[in-house]
């Protein structure tokens, strides 16, 4: 503990005198306040639950923690876009530092709704009444407003097809609906329902539901 206090005092003194501090290096970068060198050990930053993170007082831009609830790095930042949260406008929030959206599922489906290959955590069925496919995730609901479902038709006539994606809510179950429409049939005067068709397709489902603004869901 005495060593830690001495180290912190030294850092404070050197920072106050516009000098750089090096740990693990005798030649710290002169443009850095603290240079940890290029050793073979990582830096562990403070680990907080989501509740602990949101309870931090005197928030300051640039704070960094590892959120053990979401298992993700979070930084305290100012946003260029005003976000409405409850009855206040939030200009500064804890924001997850992510590399991109999370891929939830993927697969190749034939024209009879049979899975050819994929991530094995979904079911596809063709609704012969409404002429659309339904995608049901195992243990993961589908949210149209916060998930990205990418569909690529394949096979004969796929160049004439357009794809529409919707959301089906049945109690606590949320499914995606996938409709293929043949534009050549529409041009020929077919009804919208009659122009729907089966199709082989590839799909990928991404989750972009991560709540970077900590808004109520």
Image (tube, rainbow, N blue to C red):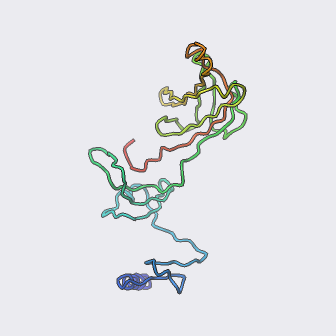
Q: Is residue 97 left or right of residue 53?
A: right
Q: Residue at x 39, y 65 (%)?
A: 62
Up-down: is 116 above or below 91?
above
Q: Residue at x 54, y 83 (%)?
A: 25
Considering the image in quadrants, where does the C terminus appear? top left
Q: Residue at x 45, y 66 (%)?
A: 46
Residue furthest out toward the left: 87
Up-down: is 87 above or below 156?
below
Nearer to me, 25 or 19: 19
Considering the image in quadrants, where does the N terminus appear? bottom left
- Tell me residue 134's x, y (percent): 59, 27
Q: How many marks?
A: 0
- Tell me residue 87's x, y (percent): 26, 44
Up-down: is 79 above or below 105?
below
Up-down: is 151 above or below 9?
above
Q: Residue at x 30, y 44 (%)?
A: 86
Toward which corner of the image does residue 16 lie, by quadrant?
Answer: bottom left
- Tell me residue 4's x, y (percent): 43, 81
Q: Is residue 58 left or right of residue 26?
A: left
Q: Is residue 121 left or right of residue 91?
A: right
- Tell me residue 58's x, y (percent): 30, 64
Nearer to me, 1 or 86: 86
Residue furthest out toward the front: 187
């Amino acid at each position: 503990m005495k060593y830690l206090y001495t180290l912190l005092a030294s850092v404070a003194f050197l920072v106050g005198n516009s000098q750089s501090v090096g740990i693990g290096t005798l030649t710290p970068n002169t443009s850095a306040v603290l240079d940890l060198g290029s050793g073979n050990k990582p830096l562990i930053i403070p680990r907080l639950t989501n509740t602990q993170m949101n309870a931090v007082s005197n928030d300051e831009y640039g704070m960094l923690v590892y959120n053990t609830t979401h298992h993700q790095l979070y930084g305290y930042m100012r946003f260029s876009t005003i976000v409405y949260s409850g009855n206040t406008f939030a200009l500064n929030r804890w924001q997850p530092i992510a590399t991109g959206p999370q891929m939830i599922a993927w697969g190749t489906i034939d024209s009879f709704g049979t899975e050819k290959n994929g991530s094995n955590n979904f079911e596809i069925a063709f609704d012969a009444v409404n002429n659309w496919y339904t995608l049901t995730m195992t243990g993961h609901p589908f949210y149209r407003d916060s998930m990205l479902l990418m569909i690529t038709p394949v096979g004969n006539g796929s160049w004439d097809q357009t794809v529409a994606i919707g959301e089906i809510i049945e109690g606590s179950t949320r499914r995606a609906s996938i409709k293929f429409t043949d534009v050549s049939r529409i041009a020929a005067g077919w009804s919208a329902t009659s122009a729907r068709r089966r199709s082989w397709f590839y799909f990928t489902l991404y989750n972009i539901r991560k709540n970077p603004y900590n808004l109520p869901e």
